[in-house]
Amino acid sequence: MSLEPAVDAQGLVRRFGDDAALDNVSLQVQPGELYGVIGPDGSGKTTLFRVLVTLLLPDEGSARVLGRDVVNDLWDLRARVGYMPGRFSLYPDLSVAENLGFFASLFNTTVAAARETIAPIWVQLEQFSARRAGALSGGMKQKLALCCALVHRPEILILDEPTTGVDAVSRREFWGLLRRLRDEGLPIVVSTPYMDEAGLCDRVSLMQDGKLLVTDRPAEIERRYPLPLFAVRGDNVLGLLGALRRFPHAASVWPFGESLHYTDARTDSEPGMIARELSQYVESAGFREASIQPIAAGIEDAFMWYMSQGQAA
Amino acid sequence: MKAFLGFVRKETLHLLRDRQTLAILLLLPLIQVLIFGFAVRTDVRKIPIAVVDPTPDIATLELRDRLAASERFHVVGVASSSQNLETQFRAGSIRQALVLPSEVERRLGRGDSLLIQLLTDGSDPNTGGIMQGYATAVIHRWYGDAAPAQDGLRIEPTSRLRYNPTLESSHLFVPGLVAFVLTIMSAMMTAISITREKETGTMEMLLVSPIRPAAIVVGKVIPYIVLGFSGVILVLIAARVVFQVPLRGSLTLLLAECGLYIITALALGIVISTKAPTQRTAMIFALAGLMMPTMLLSGFIFPLDSLPGWLQAISFMVPARWFLVVVRGIMIKGAGLATLWQETLVLLGMTAFFLLVGSRKLAIRLS
């Protein structure tokens, strides 16, 4: 395995009209790394990936994938990259086996030659091999697309929102497959709008408005959460949300499943003291049953924080 | 090569899976031959004609017999004066009237000049002209036989129509139909199938693969070339069996020219597909940009000579115009490459031009 980064992008800018879909994006993906790009719809993930797979020309900046320039080494690179576009892009009128065979032939190879690479996915797909791709479930479609992206045994996988619109079980299975491929040494760049998937990556970048806000290991991003955080539970979550947001020291309050995550703006106070102060406040506001506990920030807290700040940390 | 073959296989599968489109593509030419053959005839049969014969004699009876014997005419009545003709024309019960002078036989015997009036319903100028032609032909032949030679010497012009002596309109429309079928299949289906890949996002997958755009396009069109050829052969068989349209020239040359025209048309389809973002726009481009000119500006339906000058100038840019000359030449006149090389050269030039434009516009990236 070379020590050269699998992806090395420097100052990528891509404009559509007056909008900059990519605004000075730089990133490195190390060999054998599972790298996530997390961001809401329209944040520029797809544009970034399309530049990396040679589909779009950057207006400024440069990118090398597997040590090859995405503009000049176009054909060399295309034979080595496995790409899954964001939209289901297989032929619905062809069967599973026919789709796979077609993509193998596009890369001048055969399904048999890739048998070992695709084995973990093929096990799940095999029973549907005669079925038309259009008649597969969402999760199966994505597995087939992954299979097609792997069939030429690429040296890197670039997957644009592979789990969007897929049920929770299939998503977990899909990530299991990705981690397994990563363990075999394949570098993977994957984007997702789901923040809970960020924790499954080796490193993640948070993307918003064409910029990368923060890049780090998920645990590190959690650890770097700058302010005290509390989970607040109660009967009237909606009422609590309003009350907490009116609290003078509130930095942010977000609903989080059945609880609320409250971030205090003060860095100099001890968490226990803030918790006591908070519970007095909510009690006086009429919420008697509320429980307040200091917690460690999760990846989603961190992302909500960075996105509300809208700036690089 | 493997990639290319895989592509051809995939396109063939698409075509075979889409039974409906396949059926339409194969049946369309057949249905068109039958419709054009039976319904849209420009030759006329059983023209209702009235004869005004004030003094019937042997000569006029002979003329009336000849009219009645022809399947072109149906003699609806014989009157002694022309006073009712106007009403009959208005009512549509007659479309032609033949007004003879009196004492025809005596005049013929004396060698006097004979004034015969032929009235034709000209509300439809095309059929009007045709009806007039038929009637004049009958009268001339009758006159030639009935009038005695003067002083033993007479100049008698005999006119004969070459290649299509009975003026069968099917001889005219079959070559046009071949051009039409090939244009639709090759150009429109190519344009649609390329834009479909753009629309469904599969083009993105094809672009990131190492297959070259040229291989994509060639792989895509090969099944349609086969389909186009089947269409041509179906039309030719139907034309032969149902309408007895002759094939006087070489079948090999005809098929070779069809092959050339298929490539012309699909090159046009490629050009369209580089401009059209969706299947719908590709279809509209193909219909407006190809089908109408192929029908109207190629000489298929309307004679090119009757077009105004500027439209004639445009017609020179319509590939079907040149192809039609070639097909008519081979089928009806039995012409060979020796006489058709100019048209063939024009088609070759157009093909090269469209292929060049199309391949230059083929994107290797998204935009």
Image (cartoon, coloured by chain):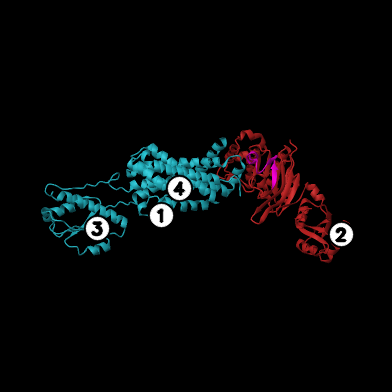
Instruction: For marks 1 and 3, give the one nearer the viewer.
Output: 1
Mark 2 neighbour density, 10 Å: few (under 14) some (14–19) many (20 or more):
some
Instruction: For marks 4 and 2, give the one nearer the viewer.
Output: 4
Chain letter for mark 3, please.
Answer: B
Query: SS class of the residue under badge 1?
Result: helix
Q: Nearer the viewer, residue A42 or A111?
A: A42
The correct choice, above or below, for B114 with respect to A35 in the image is below
The correct choice, above or below, for B85 with respect to B37 in the image is below
Query: SS class of the residue under badge 4?
Result: helix
Residue position marked by numbered label 2 in the rendering: A274
Mark 1 neighbour density, 10 Å: few (under 14) some (14–19) many (20 or more):
few
Residue A236 position in % (x across, y down) = 77, 62
Chain letter for mark 4, please.
Answer: B
Residue A73 is covered by the magenta coloring:
yes
Residue B159 is left or right of residue A288, and the answer is left
- Mark 4 near mark 2, Cβ–Cβ under 8 Å? no
The amino acid pointed to by label 3 is Gln
Query: SS class of the residue under badge 2?
Result: helix
Residue A111 is covered by the magenta coloring:
no
Residue position marked by numbered label 1 in the rendering: B311
The amino acid pointed to by label 2 is Ile
The amino acid pointed to by label 4 is Ile
Structural distance between the alpha carbons of marks 4 and 1: 22 Å
Residue position marked by numbered label 4 in the rendering: B184
Chain coloured red in the rendered structure: A
